[in-house]
Structures are given as C-alpha cells and as structure tokens.
Image: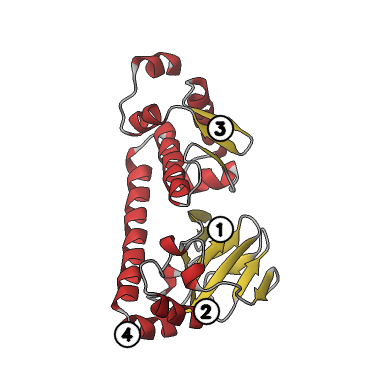
C-alpha cells in the first residue's frame, strides 16, 4: 500500500520509550521479549497515508510508536464522521475484532510509525501470559470509557464546553507521555476537530475565539497554550465565573 514502508525493529518492547502506555507495561523482560517476537517489523506511514481502510480484512492491531492518527467512519450516504485521534502507546484496529474487518479508515496526521501485532498470535500469547491479557482487557476498557465520554460531550455540552473537554483530554494524554500538559501543537486541523466534536468549522472558530478572549486558552495557528487550567476545567463543569459570563455576552 502506498505510503507504507516496513522497517526492521531497532528496539524491543522492553526498551520502547512508550512501553508504559502500551501492551508491554508491567511485563517481565522475558515476557516482553515474547511479545516482541510477534512484531517482526514496524511500519512507517507517511503523512496523509492510510494505515488501513474500512472493510479490509482484520489481521493485526497496530500500536502507535511515533506520530498521530485519525480514524473516520462513513455512512452509506458517504458522510464521514471522525471518531478519534490516536497517539503513541495507543492501539488502532480494536473495533475490528468483533467482525474481522476494519470498521474505519486510519490515516496518519504526520509521518508516523506503528508496530503491527498479529491478533491471532496475540490471543494465543495472552492465554499464556495473564499480565498481557490484563493489559489487553485494560486497553479495551479504556476504549469503551473514551466512547462514553465522547457521547456525553456530544449529548450534553455546548460548543465551548466540548472544545474545553477536547483540550483537557489532549492535555492529560500529553502529560502521560512526558510532555507539557499546557503547551502543545495540534496535529489535526480545525475541520478535523469539528468533525470529531460534531460542530461546524465556524462554530469551532467561535469557540476558540471565546476561550481566547477570556484568557483561558491561547491558540496561534496549531500551537495551543492553556493559560488557566482551573478555569478551563470549571467551564467544562458548567461553572463559569462572573468574568467569563460578562465577556461572553
């Protein structure tokens, strides 16, 4: 497939820099080595190239080692809905397990790198290694929780609150990876964010302007700086202070 290039692994799971976020977390060195054995090569995915498409046969999960991806589903009428953004240490392809076909398109937002994990081999190894089975179950549970949080955002939050939830989620995930939780660069476009949050582009722009005018978040191009994390969290909780309320009128 165009945009994909296999490369030999230069590190094992036990020495990977994102192992504390991936399936190898907590595994003994010998067990991590066994996991590494079912990842014969990594794949480099060029920016804007697809890792897989909806409907393709499911064979492997993909652990993101470097870069960022977006996943999109399409209706029968051809309308697309962006369903998530995946960072290093997270898995792609989980939603294909039940039907043995990928349910979405996965596209790289920047030059990225993934570790293909053959699922049949992973299942066999998980039966032998309870700690690996636990990690796989934990990952599946995290996906369910994330879906629930997304449904809550779409059903109960206004545009500014949805954007606050999005920035806070990115902040938490960046901090887990050892980066600044309050200053980061968006890999996705405003159109992507709008599709994910169920908002039009102009609504996203207005929500950004609202956060900027209230000195809560500074956005310059794709660079984001959270200026006032407590007020951003208060906005998500529906607890706007008088200063925000006056500025919003």
User: How far is disc 2 from disc 4 in space, using C-alphas?
Assistant: 17 Å
Q: Nearer the viewer, mark 1 or mark 2?
A: 2
* Residue 89 x, y percent position in the rendering: 47, 61
Q: Residues within 10 Å of mark 2 (few under 14, many from 20)?
A: many
Mark 3 vs 4: CB contact within 8 A: no
Residue 9 at least partly seen = yes
* Residue 100 x, y percent position in the rendering: 44, 79
* Residue 42 x, y percent position in the rendering: 59, 73
Q: Residue at x 31, y 63 (%)?
A: 141
Please report whichever mark, 1 or 4, sits nearer to the chain's N-terminal start. Answer: 1
Q: Is residue 178 above or below residue 246?
A: below
Disc 4 designates what residue? Answer: 128
Q: Is residue 85 above or below residue 179?
A: below
User: What count of labels does the image hold?
Assistant: 4
Query: Which numbered marker is on residue 69?
Result: 1
Please report whichever mark, 2 or 4, sits nearer to the chain's N-terminal start. Answer: 2
Q: Quadrant of the C terminus?
A: top left
Q: Residues within 10 Å of mark 3 (few under 14, many from 20)?
A: some
Mark 1 vs 2: CB contact within 8 A: no
Q: Residue at x 43, y 72 (%)?
A: 96
Q: Nearer the viewer, mark 1 or mark 4?
A: 4
Disc 3 designates what residue? Answer: 205
Please report whichever mark, 3 or 4, sits nearer to the chain's N-terminal start. Answer: 4
* Residue 5 x, y percent position in the rendering: 68, 73
Q: Quadrant of the N terminus?
A: bottom right
Disc 2 designates what residue? Answer: 39
> What element does badge 4 sit on?
helix
Please report whichever mark, 1 or 3, sits nearer to the chain's N-terminal start. Answer: 1
User: How far is disc 2 from disc 3 in space, using C-alphas?
Assistant: 42 Å
> What element does badge 1 sit on?
strand
């Amino acid at each position: 497939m165009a945009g994909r290039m296999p490369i030999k692994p230069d590190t094992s799971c036990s020495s990977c820099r994102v192992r504390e976020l991936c399936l190898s977390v907590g595994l003994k060195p010998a067990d991590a080595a066994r996991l590494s054995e079912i990842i014969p090569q990594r794949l480099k995915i060029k920016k804007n190239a697809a890792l897989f498409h909806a409907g393709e046969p499911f064979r492997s999960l993909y652990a993101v080692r470097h870069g960022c991806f977006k996943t999109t589903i399409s209706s029968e009428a051809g309308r697309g809905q962006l369903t998530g953004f995946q960072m290093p240490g997270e898995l792609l392809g989980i939603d294909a397990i039940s039907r043995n076909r990928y349910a979405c398109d996965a596209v790289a937002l920047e030059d990225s790198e993934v570790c293909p994990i053959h699922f049949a081999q992973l299942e066999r190894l998980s039966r032998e290694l309870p700690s690996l089975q636990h990690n796989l179950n934990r990952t599946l549970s995290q996906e369910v929780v994330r879906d629930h949080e997304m449904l809550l955002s779409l059903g109960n939050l206004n545009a500014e609150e949805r954007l606050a939830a999005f920035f806070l989620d990115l902040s938490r995930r960046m901090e887990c990876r050892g980066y600044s939780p309050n200053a980061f660069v968006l890999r996705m476009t405003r159109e992507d964010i709008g599709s994910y949050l169920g908002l039009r582009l102009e609504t996203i722009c207005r929500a950004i302007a609202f956060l900027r005018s209230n000195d809560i978040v500074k956005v310059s191009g794709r660079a984001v700086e959270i200026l006032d994390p407590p007020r951003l969290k208060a906005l998500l909780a529906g607890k706007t202070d008088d200063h925000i309320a006056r500025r919003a009128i």
